[in-house]
Image (tube, rainbow, N blue to C red):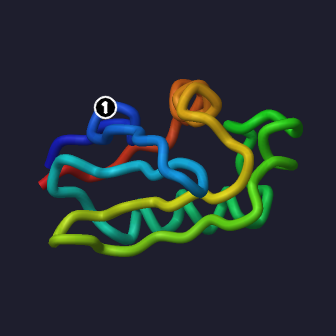
Amino acid sequence: MEKKRLKDVSQVVETQEGVKIEVKESVNLEGIKEIVDNCKTGKCDCMSQEVKAKVSFMDFRVENGKPVIEIKGDVKEEDIRQALEKSQKYLDVK
């Protein structure tokens, strides 16, 4: 099984309420859930403290058969792209 970073298997899209990360490849959902849980509880250091302060909501769901991470708040696409660049967590790609 191949391993890739989230930034390599996803697309960041700005929404009216913030940003969503759409995963484009078939990956292990537990890995994405772990990334989101770590981020929500502050166990990651991908986002700067300034960006973390702008996030009001973060959750993971499956939309049209694909994983989506929804991030609400005063965050921009570039903020999340920078965070994904720093992320060292690898996902199992099927």
Image vertical order of residue 24 relative to residue 7, above or below: below
Left or right: where does residue 24 sit relative to residue 46? left
Question: The disc labelled 1 sits on which kind of residue?
Answer: Asp
Question: Looking at the image, how many numbered discs can be counted on the residues?
Answer: 1
The answer to which image quadrant residue 86 occupies is top right
Q: Residue at x 27, y 39 (%)?
A: 9
Q: Is residue 69 left or right of residue 16?
A: left
Q: Residue at x 52, y 29 (%)?
A: 81
Q: Position of residue 22 (x, y in %)?
A: 32, 51
Q: Position of residue 24 (x, y in %)?
A: 20, 47
Answer left or right for 81 relative to 2.
right
Question: Which of the pair 32/51 is nearer the observer?
Answer: 51
In depth, the one of 1 and 51 nearer the eye is: 51
Give the quarter of the image for residue 38.
bottom right
Q: Which residue is mark 1?
A: 8
Image position of 24 with respect to 47: above or below: below
| Residue 72 in the image, given as x and y percentages of width and height | 64, 59
Location of the C terminus by quadrant is bottom left
In what element is the residue under mark 1? helix
